[in-house]
Image (cartoon, coloured by chain):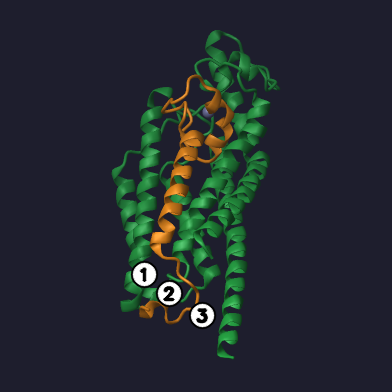
Amino acid sequence: MPQATAAVPAALPQIPVSDLAPWAIFSALLAAVVLFFVGAEQGAFSVLEGTLVHEWVHDARHVMGYPCH
Amino acid sequence: MTPRTFLVHGLVAGLVAGIAAFLIAYVVAEPQIDTAIALEEAASAAPAGHTHAEGTPAHSHDEEEAGHSHGQEAEVSRDTQSTWGLATGTILFGTVIGGATALAAAFALGRLGSLGARGSTATITLVGFVATALVPFLKYPSTPPAVGSGDTIGERTGLYFAFWAISLAAAVIAVVAARRLHERIGGFNAMVVAALGYLVVVLAVGLALPTVNELGAFPADTLWYFRRESLVTLAGLWAVLGVVLTGLVGRDADKALADQRRREAAAAL
Ligand SMILES: [Zn+2]
């Protein structure tokens, strides 16, 4: 055990990075897809036709600080 | 205390935070959005020769607005945009941000000096708010409807996401660096050095990237109110996320610790 953890109150477990990696990648992908659709789809980019996604999340896009139109 | 429990806690805390953000935004930000859209309509109606009477009903946005994406096609009414639409956006955003924050907190568990599970989780949430909401907002603040030219949307979106990503990357590096420095110069010094390093990076990049200013004659009061409410909404989302996630992780850590003590006591017999 490295000394950095010496002061940690009894046995606070560390989660090995190898255990974390797949979950971290999954949640990062999830976040990327959602942030894309909430923040940019049918604005700067258009994966889907039309303006429905843009219009549906329009107010959230403005309030959460993404450029909208 | 597994990655899975962290992710589930994060998604739950993020869902709650997204609902809170919807309520905050609905109450404080929607009136400013309505004001901005009314101005937008007046501006697009004026060249066509009619002056807008006050008290323009919300639905006229859908019929009269020219050249703007929201409402023109009337696919989604303003009433839906400001309720279900707003809720969809904030809740999806909160949920995935919660999941990602929780996994960062899972990494931080037992790795941030002498901080316990609650301390490290709260720290990670605070870093997340500063790096992905506050600092990007300070460089590229939110803009109400009616501000911004459709010609530059690609460029503005690119700049926003680029600065957001750089800020996030700088914050991750700062936290990792603080861990390294901790053993050599102590926790407090490591934190100060890491925070300064982060600030130098985002200030330098912020100064280097172009400024976006497409305000034109948009009224300053509405702009300020909208931006303030936007920041209040983001801060509210992160605050609720931080409190709920810290609570859930802390409870889990207490349980894990109690289990371990019981096992040790049993082994000692
Ligand atoms: Zn808009």
Task: Tell me the SS state at disc 3.
Answer: loop
**Residue on which disc 2 sits:** B113
Of residues B237 and B52, the one drawn nearer to the viewer in this rendering? B237
Q: Residue at x 46, y 58 (%)?
A: B104
Whole-percent x, y for residue B262 in the image:
61, 81
Task: Kindly identify which numbered label has been placed on residue B179.
Answer: 1
Residue B121 seen in render: yes
Placement of the C terminus of chain B among the 4 image quadrants? bottom right
Q: Which chain did the image draw in orange?
A: A
* A10 shown above or below B241: below
- Whether residues under marks 1 and 2 lie with C-beta atoms below 8 angstroms apart, the answer is yes
Q: Which chain is green?
A: B
Residue positioned 51% across, 58% down in the render: B125
Q: Is residue B212 above or below residue B173?
A: above
Whether pointer 3 and pointer 2 mark residues with C-beta atoms closer than 8 Å, the reply is no
At x 52% / y 64%, what residue is drawn? B121
Disc on the earlier residue, 1 or 2: 2
Chain of the residue that carries numbered disc 3 in the rendered image: A
The secondary structure type at the circle numbered 2 is loop
Q: Residue at x 56, y 26 (%)?
A: A55
